[in-house]
Image (spheres, rainbow, N blue to C red):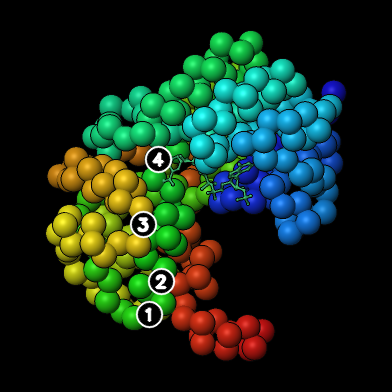
Amino acid sequence: MAHRILVIGGTGNVGGQVLSQLPATGVRVRALARNPDATRLPSHVEVVGGDLTRPETLDACLDGIDTVFLVWTAPPAAVAPAFERITRHARRIVFLTSPHKTPHPLFQQPNPLRGLHAEMERLIESSGCEWTFLRPGMFAANALGWWASQIRAGDMLRWPHLAAPSAPVHERDIAAVAVRALCEDAHAGAEYVLTGPESLSLREQVATIGRAIGRSLRVEDISPDEARRELQMPLVVVNMLLDAWAAALGQPAFVTSTVAQITGKPARTFFEWATDHAAEFRPESVRGGAAQER
Ligand SMILES: NC(=O)c1ccc[n+]([C@@H]2O[C@H](COP(=O)([O-])OP(=O)(O)OC[C@H]3O[C@@H](n4cnc5c(N)ncnc54)[C@H](OP(=O)(O)O)[C@@H]3O)[C@@H](O)[C@H]2O)c1
């Protein structure tokens, strides 16, 4: 029987790619959206309004669904009532969580998300549903929030712990594994740690973006205290990143071949990711010019 799949988080980095990669035939695909009228998704996707923090909205989204792809960025207090409804309807859940069990220092620093992810996994495991946990390391897409505005503004970037390595994973590869886990029967009980194919320091990642956009970017290492003052992110996030990068210094990033094993294709490199997103690092004037040329 064809799967009837609900994607939660379909307007985000990974969920958006899952919706694009799910086949247009052979499965029925629905997306839960907080603002269904403002959501532009592939034409084969049915969009239903719902909000994880308003559990009474979830039954209509889950009606007739057997399989759920779950991205959770809503507040922790909403977990229990939402899960009660999701696990009542779903037979299979593919959950985007994190590699908090992997014994590499980058993934082992205390932070509030670790506890939340562990608790959500426990609820799913005890629900009686079939489950697959996707445990990506650092998203390549983090580079957009971290660096795009500085790179659009000029060639100089100020950043802490530039020597810290990670293996950034392309959202398309996370989604490709998710699609297999949603559509195939062989992934029940699997926990997939997903990384990009190579260990790259933050300095090398910035240089890679420079190559992809044809610019020579310069970087200046700043202290953790300067980062706390300058980075445009909530302090709790800055501290989480500083701790992870500091712990990761001096050893290569944790790299898995899981993307290739599950999808049959090698994980995309950070250069491929930067090329896919080059326009987002170019100044508005250049992007406008490129659009006019097209
Ligand atoms: N960044 C990393 O390096 C990293 C590494 C490992 C794991 N992760 C995990 O990956 C997840 C984030 O994935 P992502 O980057 O794809 O997410 P994202 O781009 O931030 O998208 C979040 C999605 O969740 C939806 N959403 C938020 N609150 C909602 C609510 N109350 N009800 C319904 N939908 C709601 C958003 O919908 P709207 O359009 O309505 O806002 C959006 O579709 C997090 O759980 C994070 O811990 C991240």
| Callout 3 amino acid | Met
Looking at the image, is mark 4 or mark 3 earlier in the sequence? 4
> Looking at the image, is mark 3 or mark 1 nearer the viewer?
3
Q: Residue at x 76, y 44 (%)?
A: 49
Residue for badge 2: 149
Question: Residues under labels 4 and 3: Cα distance?
Answer: 19 Å
Kind of residue indicated by mark 1: Ala
User: Where's the C terminus, which quadrant?
Assistant: bottom right
Side of 57 where 247 appears, left or right: left
Of discs 1 and 4, which sits in the foreground? 1
Sequence-wise, the earlier of marks 2 and 3 is 2
Question: Is the shortest distance between ligand 1 and the CB of mark 4 under 8 Å?
Answer: yes
Residue underneath mark 1: 153
Q: Residue type at mark 2?
A: Ser
Pick whichever of labels 3 and 1 is earlier in the sequence: 1
Q: Quadrant of residue 228?
A: bottom left
- Spatial CA distance of label 2 from label 1 is 6 Å
